[in-house]
Amino acid sequence: MEFKEIVEKFQVPETFISCEPYGEGHINDTYQVKCEGKRYILQRMNHHVFHHPEQLMSNIVKVTEHLKKKIEENGGDPLRETLTVIPTKEQESFFVTPDGNYFRMYDFIENAQTYQVVEQPVHFYNAAKAFGRFQKLLNDFPADELYETIPNFHHTLKRFEALKKAVAENKAGRKEEVAAEIAFAMEREKDVSILVELIAEKKIPLRVTHNDTKFNNIMIDDASGEGICVIDLDTVMPGSLLYDYGDSLRFGTNPASEDEKDLTKVYMDIELFEQFSKGFIEEMGSTLTKTEREFMPFSAKLMTFECGIRFLTDYLEGDHYFKIHYPEQNLDRTRTQFKLVADMEKKMEQMKAIVAKY
Ligand code: ADP
Ligand code: GN1
Ligand code: MG
């Protein structure tokens, strides 16, 4: 089907002009749709990653409706501060093409940007506030109404077991080439059960969390620099607040890109760590439990390690999960994550002191 035909399945009154690939997400195919006087986002959901796109969309509709109500109550702009799902002419939240591809549309959030690296520290502080606010707005959302779109998404122990299996199977024949990275991962096996166990023992509460809080999943307002809208709601599920906090630091404290080849450029910028931690703690306030606070610095390292082992697993399996633009990209991504882990290990005491300060 042509893009124009797909767009016409949705409640879009304006005349279609064009549709082009957009953004730098690793999972879905995102397009910018230009219509007369208005832009939209069109996405082909990745149904190899999300096995039940209809469940995914049920989550997103419920979560955005809940957020819109709260944003309105607080005097905000519900059309700008969360995603707006455009329904199809059949009143569905998505459209399935005859060849089995799932599409959805959102309003385009104008006068705001996503960034691939933090360009101004204050943006990162503002992002922390926005991710914290997002959590708080979902505090009273009934978690049992959410489908688990990817089971065990942040179950680091299972992610580690998946890596071991990928090493044993060596499907892409790349095991020898990544011996150093495998060794780095294996040396940190003791870390992978820590959060999982605390959650199982109910020492850390389950909340409704975003689970993919990288800096390019938040729109920064052009005029104010505020984190105006949290996007990419595909993985909103029950989880730990530490997943959201830790994953933000993983991506945002690195001044280089996630696939930077020159590892001398890759490190955890402690000033950015401070900006984010300050914003997040200020926003979450007394909602944070003592144990959550205690494990905040560790969660940054763990989420970075988890992402690194996911990239490494995908590299060993032949790159079927994350989108790549060249053959070694998942290996480059693995290396940046492991470099960050090593740097965070060195800076752990500093990180703890910062968290204790706020
Ligand atoms: P993925 O799951 O592949 O990461 P995202 O939902 O994060 O896909 O979208 C990819 C990119 O598209 C985002 O980083 C952002 O730049 C842009 N984008 C997504 N939704 C919107 C929107 N509603 N308005 C403007 N830009 C958007
Ligand atoms: C993916 O969809 P995107 O690009 O925002 C991934 C995250 C990883 C991230 C690494 C559903 O995020 O879990 O942390 O890449 N999303 C999914 O950059 O697997
Ligand atoms: Mg994204």
Image (cartoon, rainbow, N blue to C red):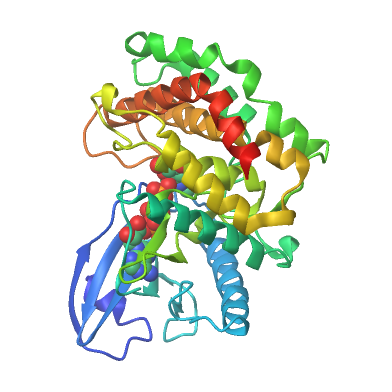
Task: State the count of labels.
Answer: 0
Q: Quadrant of the N terminus?
A: bottom left
Split into quadrants, the picture shows ligand 2 in the one at top left
User: Going by the picture, which residue comes out furthest to the bottom?
Assistant: 13
Q: Nearer the viewer, residue 313 or 173?
A: 313
Q: In percent of the image, x 36 and y 13: which residue is there? A: 178
Horizontal and vertical percent for residue 263? 29, 23
Q: Nearer the viewer, residue 46 or 65?
A: 65
Left/right placement of residue 270 relative to residue 142 reads: left
The quarter holding residue 254 reads: top left
Residue 319 lies, with reference to residue 106, above or below; the image says above
Q: Quadrant of the C terminus?
A: top right
Residue 248 lies, with reference to residue 129, above or below; the image says above
Q: In percent of the image, x 68 and y 55: which residue is there? A: 285
Q: In percent of the image, x 42 and y 59: which residue is there? A: 218
Residue 253 lies, with reference to residue 81, above or below; the image says above
Q: Tell me if I can see residue 244 in this picture.
A: yes
Q: Tell me if I can see residue 97 in this picture.
A: no
The quarter holding residue 62 reads: bottom right
Q: Nearer the viewer, residue 164 or 218?
A: 218
Residue 262 lies, with reference to residue 7, above or below; the image says above
Q: In percent of the image, x 71 and y 41: which residue is there? A: 292
User: Going by the picture, which residue comes out furthest to the front?
Assistant: 357
Left/right placement of residue 285 relative to residue 338 reads: right
Horizontal and vertical percent for residue 2? 22, 71
Left/right placement of residue 337 relative to residue 63 reads: left
Horizontal and vertical percent for residue 250? 46, 37
Horizontal and vertical percent for residue 302? 56, 30
